[in-house]
Amino acid sequence: MAFGRSAGHDGAMTEIPHPFPHRDAPLPTTTSADERTWAIVAHVSTLAAAVLSAGWLSIVGPLVIWAIHKDRSPFIRQAAAGAFNFNLVIWAMTLVGWVCFFTIIAIPVALVLWAVAFVAGVWFHVRAALAANRGEGYRYPWGITVLS
């Protein structure tokens, strides 16, 4: 099977879609208001859940949104997967902070890790939500890729 452009029987060029689009493929240039809203919710739900659950349920919102919208919209899928994957790093930093805290000697390391996790979580989720509001995709600086 060829990919790209192909000449048909009448000599006209036709586009042949790639059967497996790359996960980093460009997102559609136009997004609906509904798509932007769900992408914003995917990013902001992590902050709301973090406040309500002391950070432990921050992956639930993006995971639910990804599960519902993964086949409906590439824009929402990318936003929810990015928020989920980024939150795995935040979780890991928080857990390592707790391990350091309980060793007593490494309490200063724990405090730094928690501060970095808090500031990074708020900063990058707000930036991602603002990008989603403009209809733009956002790539988080770090993430453990579980969802795509």
Image (tube, rainbow, N blue to C red):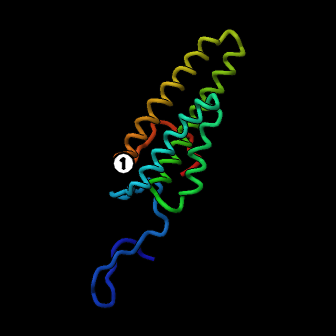
Q: Secondary structure at mark 1?
A: loop
Q: Residues within 10 Å of mark 1 (few under 14, many from 20)?
A: some
Q: Residue 102 vs residue 128: left or right?
A: right
The picture places residue 111, in percent across and down from the top left corner, at 58, 15
With respect to residue 15, does 110 lie above or below?
A: above
| Residue at 46% from the left image edge and 48% from the top image edge | 39
**What residue is rendered at 64% in x and 31% in y?**
53
| Residue sitting farthest toward the top | 105
Residue 16 % position (x, y)? 39, 75
Residue that label 1 marks: 136
Residue 117 spot, x, y in % from top left: 54, 26
Q: Residue furthest bottom?
A: 10
Instruction: Give the image location of residue 109, x and y in percent.
Output: 59, 15
Looking at the rendered structure, the kind of residue marked 1 is Glu
Of residues 33 and 3, which is closer to you in this image?
33
Residue closer to the observer: 46 or 147: 46
- The image quarter containing residue 140 is top left
**Residue visible at 44% across and 30% down?**
123
